[in-house]
Image: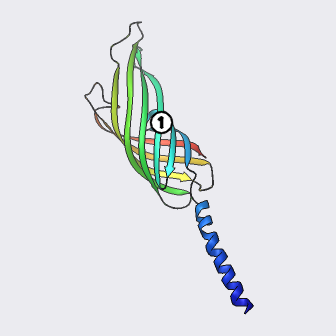
Amino acid sequence: MRFPTAVAVLSLAARAAAPRALEAQEPRNNVIYGELLGNGGASSINYERRIGSTHLRVGYGSWSSGDLFGAGSTSYKTFPFTISKVRGNGNHRLEAGGGLTIGSRSFSSSFGSRSDEDSSFQTITGIAGYRYQKPDGALVFRAVLTPLYGLGDLDTAYPDKGFFMSLGVSLGIAF
């Protein structure tokens, strides 16, 4: 009689502990990461919130680039907004999604005059790639293809009018 009772008690305890073990395997809900050459352009800082397997992201990027002959520089500000799904178990996962990057571009002349080449832009963006995140760890690494489709005419589209492919690399902390 003692053996069946012990088996029943252990079985109930295992069932009660199983949901907690599964919950402990879920990744942390918040991530802050830096990204190079991704949805936010040359570089961006991003905040991401996980709701189930859906990840909502907002970011900010800002950088400048000079032209080849030193006539001036172009400054960019970007705001990527994306939604993605993350699939898989354990540390290694697949991520896929899309969104919109909005921003502005302004040109400054090296000759002291301000140009009227300021413009805003909207770019449709995608995400498809690899995500490393330990369920109980803080480190997050992403390497994703980021197809971009610049809206508008040739002068206002970012990075160019039409389709452009990039590769984004991200490193951050989950909390």
Q: Nearer the viewer, residue 131 or 138?
A: 138
Residue 153: image quadrant is top left
Residue 126 in view, yes or no: no
In the rendered image, residue 4, in percent from the top left (x then y), is placed at 69, 89
Picture layout, residue 158 above or below residue 140: above
> What residue did someone put label 1 on?
59
Helix, strand or loop for disc 1: strand
Q: Point out the residue furthest to the top here.
A: 112
Colouring scheme, one of rainbow, by chain, secondary structure, one colour: rainbow
In the rendered image, residue 111, in percent from the top left (x then y), is placed at 40, 7
Residue 131 in view, yes or no: yes
Q: Nearer the viewer, residue 155 or 111?
A: 155
- The reply, left or right, for residue 76 in relation to residue 173 is left
- The reply, left or right, for residue 70 in relation to residue 172 is left
Q: Amino acid at mark 1?
A: Gly
Q: Point out the residue furthest to the bottom here.
A: 1
Q: Quadrant of the N terminus?
A: bottom right
Q: Nearer the viewer, residue 49 or 112?
A: 49
Residue positioned 35% across, 12% down in the render: 115
Residue positioned 47% across, 36% down in the render: 59
Residue positioned 56% across, 41% down in the render: 32
Mark 1 surroundings: few (<14), some (14-19) or many (≥20) residues within 10 A: many
In the rendered image, residue 127, in percent from the top left (x then y), is placed at 40, 47
Residue 101: image quadrant is top left
In the rendered image, residue 158, in percent from the top left (x then y), is placed at 34, 31
Residue positioned 56% across, 46% down in the render: 30
- The reply, left or right, for residue 154 in relation to residue 105 is left
